[in-house]
Image (cartoon, grey):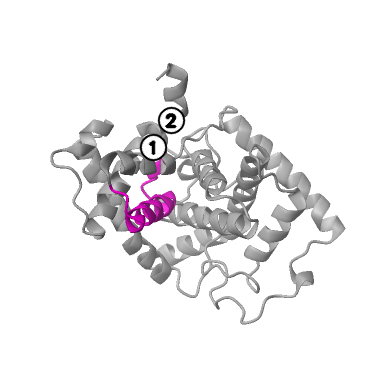
Amino acid sequence: MTATGLKQLSNALATPDQLSNSSSSIDGVPSDLETSIRVAGAQLTQTAGVLLGLSQDNISQAIVIFTRFWLGADGGSLRIYSTKDVSAAALYMTAKLSFQPTSPRSVLNVYTLLCSSDTSPLWFVNPKGAPDEAPAMESYLLTEGEYQFARLTLLRIESVILRILGFDTHVALPHTIALTYLQTLGATRPAVARRVVEHLNAALLSPQLLYVTHQPNALAVAAIYLAAREEGIKLVDGNWWEVFDVDREELGFLVVGMRSLEGFMRREMEQWKNKTIPLVVDDLDSEIERRRMMVEGE
């Protein structure tokens, strides 16, 4: 395979310094709050992409770009850029670069629905739960004035994302690689392939940022390993993962990371029970001030 071909199957990974020193942390955002907001933003992107009818490939790429945006001291800060705006711009940009472009109006109407505490089905936006009946269209369609203002914000944040990422929007995903590996291993049961894809999609929400710290081939191998164990499928003898250029230590880390996501999400839902995760700058500032006052009151 040519060097160009190899590049298309790999990603530029986050450096240790980018992982330990984000712009948000420098601006005083507690690490646990930063993680909660980042994971909520990934869920928001996923849900918005589904409502817009985008492919999972497009949605996954948008989540990776959204995640990359916040990395490092030179990345975006949650104290400056609203999570919902970055999510919307990442999804709009990714769709625009694909065979499934979607209009700014469609994107903004969907985000208005999802970010409303009255109409949203998302637990971290609407703690009361999704309404029993579908919300009236006029409750989330933007007026012309609101739309024009939101459109300017969308396009501005899109340009900020491109600048911070150095215009590098390439994202290699592990899904197709994993299916190819399954065929190579002779694991052709549909249930195994389905579980592999489920693990890869869930890993997009990982608090360990698995998609920006490990290459697609390693993510694919870890998802296959987990799915095969869960479905009781014996793969080939020996350290088969080494054939796909993954060592035991990396495999172990990824498997633990993927398996820990369910517990992490349960803890998040308990921690934020009856509260909303701040997705805009003003709400984040209020949450940080609330925490400060609680500490000072102790």
Q: Residue furthest top?
A: 2
Q: Principal SS element in the magenta part?
A: helix
Q: Earlier in the sequence, mark 2 or mark 1?
A: 2
Q: Residue at x 61, y 82 (%)?
A: 132
Q: Which residue is mark 1?
A: 216
In depth, the one of 131 and 85 nearer the eye is 131
Q: Amino acid at mark 1?
A: Pro
The residue furthest right is 144
Residue 285 visible at all: no
Q: Residue 237: which quarter of the image?
A: top left
Query: Which of the image's four quarters has the N terminus?
Result: top left
Vertical position of residue 239 compared to residue 285: above or below: above
Q: Residue at x 55, y 40 (%)?
A: 76
Which residue occupies the foreground of this view, 47 or 197? 197
**x 65%, y 45%: residue:** 89
**Within 10 angstroms of label 1, few (less than 14), some, or many (20 or more) residues?**
many
Where residue 232 sits: x, y (%)?
21, 59
**In the image, 188: left or right of 275?**
left
Whole-percent x, y for residue 45 in the image: 56, 53
**Dots 2 and 1: beta carbons under 8 Å?**
yes
The label number, if any, that marks residue 9 in the structure image = 2
The magenta stretch spans residue 264: no
Q: Is residue 97 above or below residue 147?
A: above
Amino acid type of the residue that numbered disc 2 sits on in the rendered structure: Leu
Look at the image and give the residue range highlighted in magenta: 187-212
Name the image quarter holding residue 32: bottom left
Residue 199 falls within the magenta-colored stretch: yes
Above or below residue 207? Residue 114 is below
Disc 2 crowd, CA 10 A, few/some/many (<14, 14-19, 20+): some
Residue appearing at x 59%, y 60% in the figure: 283
**With respect to residue 263, does 57 lie above or below?**
above
